[in-house]
Image: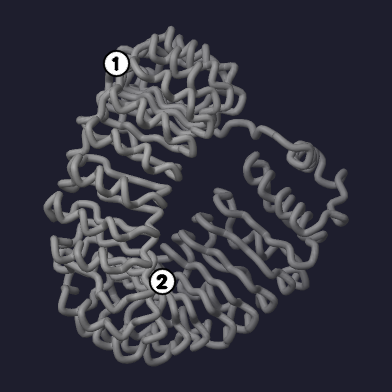
Amino acid sequence: MGIVCSSAESVVESLDTPKLSRSKSLRHPQRRRRLSLGSSTLVELCLDRLAIELASAPTSVDTTALPSELFGALLRRLVAHEVLTVELFALLGESLPLGTRVDLSDCANVNEGWLQALAPSIAASLTHIDLTRCAGVETLGREPLVALRVAKLSHCKNLSPLALHPLSNATRLTVLHLAGCALLRNESLGHLWACTQLNELDLSQCTSISDTGLFVLPSSLRRLNLNHCSGISDRGVLAVVTGLVSLFSLNLGQCSITNGALAMLAVHAHQLQHLVLSGCRAVDQSGVNLLGSLTELVSFEASQCRLVQSPHTAWGSLTALDLSNSGVDEAGLAAIGSLETLTSLDVSQSQATATAFQYLKSLSRLRYLKAARTRLDDATFHILCEHLASLEDLHVAHTNVSDMGARSLPHLKRLRSLVLSTEGITYHSVSSVGSLHQLTSLDLFGASIADRGLECLASLQSLRRLVLCGGYLTDRGAGTLASSAPHLTELNVSHNRELRGAGVQCLAQLLGLKTLNVSNTSIDAASLVYLQPLQHLETLLACVFL
């Protein structure tokens, strides 16, 4: 849940130092700084020590004897400490163990020179490489990557149209992620023709790819992600369904397709198990009705398809359904209720009546239910709680559920995550929540929760994440919270204006905290020094008025 600070506030996200300087310019928040890594195991401690030694004296450490997994973990440590350089990477490359997973994801200074710094024999033996979000990478070097099996290049936004040439002879390549590589063109995909073992390809957000590029994809593909490829139309779907006969997962979200594409799927893609049509606004219910032949379908997504009201009742194997922000109505909920194999369902923003949600009571296998921003009321919520005893994750934010409905929560003994962010929820509901002993995550953002009742959280020994942003929590409540939920690792108490320095002292007793949000409270900068005992804290959000 994002917090937006005004221009008169600053964001503090590190406790490396208790000093919080007042900026002369209030337009720019303080720069994010990485915390030093904590080492909770002996292996992590040793890897951190190795990383420090390598950074200071690269030739003093012999890494040739490290197993593949530990070598990969050491690289991640160097990246996290922001000390990995091209020279050090080239030196380490000389001792790369066979099958090493080279993970340089999020390493800001990586560019194509890093791969070129490796000896040709080393580059030719690479099997796994992850350059996710390495914006400086434009090519994959000059040497053929013939042994490569997995390449993750998502969000290398400057990857050039010719960058895939080193993969031309990568006959062992099975996984290729290119999400967000917007410079790639149709001809770029021609380099993949020889990748006869490629079974997973992610081209999401590759906005320069059009229908033509899909005709040259390897026929071995089983998973294809074309999400947000606006250049893909019905013609592209024809290329997919006729050329990729083994395909079982297809994401066409936000593509420029019509019901004509669905007609092709109905005829040529009976084997599909996963289909995403989210955001395809030209697709309507008549198109979905054509898909009755997809009897192997186990997951279907058509969120943001306002003209789709219902799944096909012939999908007897369906386990996951997402029709959020679509046109789901009473008839749609009735059809959903007939799909008794469902384990995951999202019907958020459905305009169906509260009574219509009773159709869902037959979904006894349901483990995940999201019905946010619907007309769900106490009476129907009570019925669902009585019948859906297998629920583990329940999201009913911004509904008409109040304290009366929350009394039914004890029926959900398997519940692990609960989002009950509605104004009708007050401290009276906390005792009902306290009976959910398996709960690990509780979100009461916007609920009218004050100090009273927080002691009921003491029974939730597994609770690790808590959101209390109703605006009524005070320093006294922070003290109750610290004693009742001592095992928290993530806490959001933003927007509670009565929370001040004394409350911070109480929260400092939650020694396991990794994430803390105290923005939009009355906590001042000087009070944040009380948080120094939180040795595991990685992220602190505190909008401090200057």
Residue identified by numbered label 2: 225
- Residue 295 vs 449, above or below: the answer is below
The one nearer the camera, 14 or 350, is 350
The image shows residue 186 at horizontal and vertical percentages of: 40, 80
10 Å crowding of disc 2: few (<14), some (14-19), many (20+): many
- Mark 1 to mark 2 CA distance (whole Å): 45 Å
Residue 497's disc is 1
Query: Which of the image's four quarters has the N terminus?
Result: top left
Q: Crowdedness of circle 1 by 10 Å Cα count: few (<14), some, many (20+)?
A: some
Q: Is residue 356 above or below residue 81?
A: below
The amino acid type found where label 1 is placed reads Arg
The foreground one among 505 and 376 is 376
Q: Of the residues shown, which amino acid type is indicated by label 2?
A: Asn
Q: Quadrant of residue 310?
A: bottom left
Residue 357 in view, yes or no: yes
Q: Is residue 440 visible?
A: no
Q: Are marks 1 and 2 in contact (CB under 8 Å)?
A: no
Label 1 or label 2, whichever comes before in sequence order: 2
